[in-house]
């Protein structure tokens, strides 16, 4: 083994190595080469340039792959397991590649969350647009609320990821500022559908669209968590949703 080490030469300049007197064989020919190797290890990582960011660019694809690794870790083991090194391993890339695409862990976690929101919005829009009766407020509401139930593998994964982010936000103020923002786009969308139904005479009299939207969104989130924990089945949750939709949009309403 010592002969092989000696034949390999210094790790820096490849010069012949001195004979070992005791202990492990030397790896460097001099203290100067040893110091140079140490400085190289401490030097910030430099990644090779990649294609410009774009819809199909290499950079965009790589960022997406790293974000998906965050999703898998968060959904399977929790966000506390999502260290930069663990994310790199899950994505099948080096730590340097992750550091090249994201300046730090906070940016990576926020970017991964935003990418998941964008992906869910794209999928939801496609399913809503495929409705047979897009002008039916009940069908539209049902489709919107269904997007927040773990009814397929992707939505189940998303639900677990959001739960992991929520738990992390309780002790991470920086992440909470992004995850728990003041906007309520889902509540506003549900309220808009109910408001339109009320104006068309298809809603129950006296309902408050904003308050009903708050109740529906909070309720569907809790019911979705019950499905994840197998406390309820998708069928039983569907029955609860039908009950509330019947109350808000009764079949016998004048405009129905």
Image (cartoon, rainbow, N blue to C red):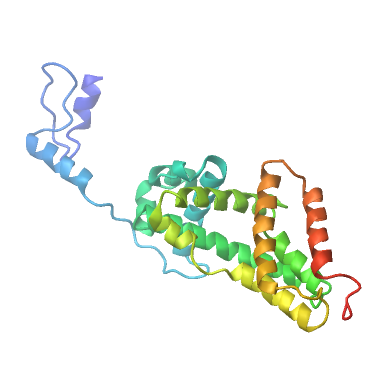
**Quarter of the image where the N terminus is located:** top left
Query: Outermost residue toward the top?
Result: 22
In the image, residue 22 lies at what x, y percent?
A: 13, 16
Decide if residue 86 is on the left or right side of residue 213. Answer: left
Instruction: Say if residue 69 shows up in the picture.
Output: no
In the image, residue 104 lies at what x, y percent?
A: 35, 55
Residue at horizontal 60%, vertical 53%? 158
In the image, residue 224 lies at what x, y percent?
A: 68, 51
Query: Nearest the camera: 72 or 166?
Result: 166
Residue at horizontal 13%, vertical 29%? 17
Query: Nearest the camera: 10 or 77?
Result: 77
Residue at horizontal 56%, vertical 46%? 75
Query: Nearest the camera: 128 or 48?
Result: 128
**Quarter of the image where the C terminus is located:** bottom right
Query: Nearest the camera: 200 or 189?
Result: 200
Query: Outermost residue toward the bottom?
Result: 199
Quarter of image, res 3: top left
Instruction: Say if residue 3 shows up in the picture.
Output: yes
Q: What is the total number of numbered labels drawn onto the structure image? A: 0
Q: Please tell me whether residue 92 is drawn above or below residue 1 in the rendered image.
A: below
Decide if residue 137 is on the left or right side of residue 83. Answer: right
In the image, residue 198 lies at what x, y percent?
A: 77, 79
Residue at horizontal 70%, vertical 67%? 212
Quarter of image, res 138: bottom right
Q: Please tell me whether residue 19 is drawn above or below residue 127 in the rendered image.
A: above
């Amino acid at each position: 083994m010592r002969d092989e080490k000696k034949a390999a030469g210094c790790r820096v300049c490849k010069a012949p190595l001195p004979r070992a007197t005791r202990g492990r064989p030397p790896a460097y020919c001099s203290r100067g080469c040893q110091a140079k190797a140490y400085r190289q290890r401490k030097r910030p990582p430099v990644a090779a340039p990649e294609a410009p960011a774009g819809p199909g660019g290499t950079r965009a694809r790589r960022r997406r792959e790293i974000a998906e690794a965050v999703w898998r870790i968060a959904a399977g083991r929790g966000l506390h397991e999502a260290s930069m090194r663990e994310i790199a391993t899950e994505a099948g890339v080096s730590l340097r590649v992750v550091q090249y695409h994201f300046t730090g862990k906070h940016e990576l976690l926020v970017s991964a969350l935003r990418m998941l929101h964008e992906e869910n919005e794209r999928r939801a829009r496609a399913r809503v647009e495929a409705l047979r009766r897009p002008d039916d407020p009940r069908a539209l509401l049902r489709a919107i609320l269904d997007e927040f139930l773990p009814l397929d593998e992707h939505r189940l994964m998303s639900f677990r990821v959001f739960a992991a982010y929520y738990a992390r936000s309780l002790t991470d103020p920086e992440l909470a500022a992004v995850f728990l923002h003041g906007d309520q786009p889902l509540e506003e969308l549900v309220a808009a559908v109910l408001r339109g139904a009320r104006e068309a005479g298809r809603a129950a009299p006296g309902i408050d669209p904003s308050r009903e939207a708050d109740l529906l969104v909070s309720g569907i989130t809790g019911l979705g968590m019950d499905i994840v924990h197998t406390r309820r089945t998708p069928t039983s949750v569907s029955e609860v949703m039908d009950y509330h939709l019947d109350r808000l949009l009764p079949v016998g309403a004048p405009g129905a």
